[in-house]
Amino acid sequence: MASVKEEIKKVTNCVPRELIYLDAYFRHYPPNDPVFTDVNVFKDVVSDFLKNRIDQLLSMAQTYFNNLEDNEKIRYRRALASMFLPSNTRVEFEWKFLDLGLVYRFKDPLHHTHYLPLCPSAQKALLEMYLTFDLPQNVENQLRIGKLNVDQFESALFNRLLCRPNTVTLLTATDLNNRNIAPVKIEFEDYGMIKPRCLSLGRGYDKVLLRKISPV
């Protein structure tokens, strides 16, 4: 029973709206269906529910984006970038976007405003949309000549690694004496955000590339 509760919590983030949608999803199954007695079947159905919600929320986000003016589209992309890469300059979402219920805003102890996806399906939908955007032109130009600053490098690395999941990326590396050593191999399977006051992503994430963000 504990594993069932954890699965529900993980996929809905205890958001009432998502709990209602999940309940409606399960009502399509008859009372004697194995989904109600077999934990593995239950997890498979929850996984299907998550995929379904990702598609629905992605469609919602795309519709919102397609109805924006060109300058608003640039701001929207920058706002998504600042959410997924918190080291970037903070850009606030418009209230009309917040009304969609995909992200929520909060203030840290220093009264800085931050945004986080409301639930896992919202995070994956917005991330999928973000990765359809090209890198900003200035980042493309600096990438071409190999002169990226720290933020530009992070943006380019994030984009390239997550646009090509489950493929090995080789990064040239040197030691402290600037001598070439074996390339660093990185293979991304997923992306997660550690919530405030949490120390990890939880179970199942034993190999991670962690980016610590300064609170200032």
Image (cartoon, rainbow, N blue to C red):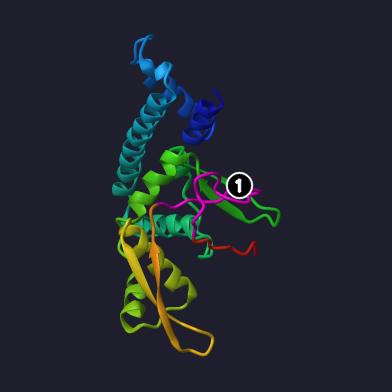
Q: Nearer the viewer, residue 28 or 132?
A: 28
x, y (%) of residue 206? Answer: 51, 52
How many marks do you count on the picture? 1
Mark 1 is surrounded, within 10 Å at the Cα level, by few (under 14), some (14 to 19) or many (20 or more) other residues, namely few
171 relative to 201 in the view: left or right: left
The reply to whether the magenta stretch includes residue 207 is: yes
113 relative to 180 in the view: left or right: right
| Kind of residue indicated by mark 1 | Phe
Q: Nearer the viewer, residue 105 or 189?
A: 189
x, y (%) of residue 128? Answer: 34, 50
x, y (%) of residue 93? Answer: 47, 51
**Secondary element at tag 1:** strand
67 relative to 16 in the view: left or right: left
The reply to whether the magenta stretch includes residue 122 is: no
Instruction: Identify the residue at image location x=30%, y=63%.
Output: 134
Query: What residue is shown with label 1?
Result: 106
Quadrant in which the N terminus appears: top right
As displayed, is residue 30 above or below residue 141?
A: above
Instruction: Identify the residue at image location x=39%, y=19%.
Output: 35
34 relative to 12 in the view: left or right: left
Looking at the magenta stretch, what is its main secondary structure? loop
x, y (%) of residue 67? Answer: 30, 46
> Hey, which residue is sitting farthest right in the picture?
109
Quadrant in which the C terminus appears: bottom right
Chain part drawn in magenta: 190-208
